[in-house]
Amino acid sequence: MRAPKGIRDLVIGNRDVDIKNTLDNSWMIPPETYREEGPCLVINSKETESQCWMGVLLAREQYLNAPNRDGKRGVKSSAVANVLWLVEGADYPPSVWRAFDMAAFRTLREVQPGTARAADFFRQNLETPVPREVIEALLFDQDDPMKRLRKNQGARGVLGPEGIALLSDTFGNGLLQEMGRGKLPPRTFIAIKPRNDVERQKLEEIGAIDA
């Protein structure tokens, strides 16, 4: 059952509740919440461990630091003991973005045309599985993002002559396993360079790189 939205993020038990997320227990509480010592649903996400914690904290005066320039107040480290934890150390799927340099990704999104952008991205991320959603975010302004990966006028056609094979779960997955590189999950791509002459020959045979 979904909690309705009220003046703040949620209404639970007829109370307006703020939701605050952090990576390090440093939630920032706005004036409208701490003036009333209102409840906050606080979430702590540990990206490196892919675990999260969720609990309830009342925004009491004694739990908060001095206001910043925006009037918001951070939760004191000593006040974390006052959180009523509802979820502790729950596992969640790793973010698909963890494997990528986001500063470089944002820069690449400005590259035109889309085919050059896709080719540059795969050059920078060799041997890294890339989910389709990452490709779609990279090629956000293209009418047909997947067309920019094809051999004809796409990234495969650019990378193949450079000795870089662009494979996917539907094109080359069996060969990847044969080469000991593991099976790609659905809707995933990977760019590789052959590690030896045997791999080069196999990739040439399927047309993934130029002979």
Image (spheres, rainbow, N blue to C red):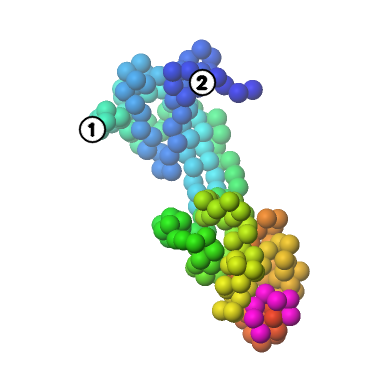
Q: Is residue 208 magenta?
A: yes
Quadrant of the snapshot with the C terminus? bottom right
Q: Is residue 19 visible?
A: yes
Q: Secondary structure at mark 1?
A: loop
Residue picked out by circle 2: 5
Structural distance between the alpha carbons of marks 2 and 1:
27 Å
Decide which of tag 2 and tag 1 comes sooner along the chain: 2
Write the start and end of the magenta stretch as one range: 205-211
90 lies above or below 140: above
Residue type (three-letter) at the residue carrying disc 2: Lys
Residue type (three-letter) at the residue carrying disc 1: Arg
Which numbered dot is residue 10? none
Q: Residue at x 63, y 57 (%)?
A: 146
- Category of crowding for the residue at label 1, using alpha-carbon neighbours closer than 10 angstroms: few (below 14), some (14–19), many (at least 20): few
133 lies above or below 202: above
Q: Residue at x 64, y 22 (%)?
A: 1
Characterize the magenta stretch by its predominant secondary structure.
Answer: loop
Q: Residue at x 35, y 16 (%)?
A: 36
Report whether 211 appears left or right of 136: right
Residue picked out by circle 1: 69
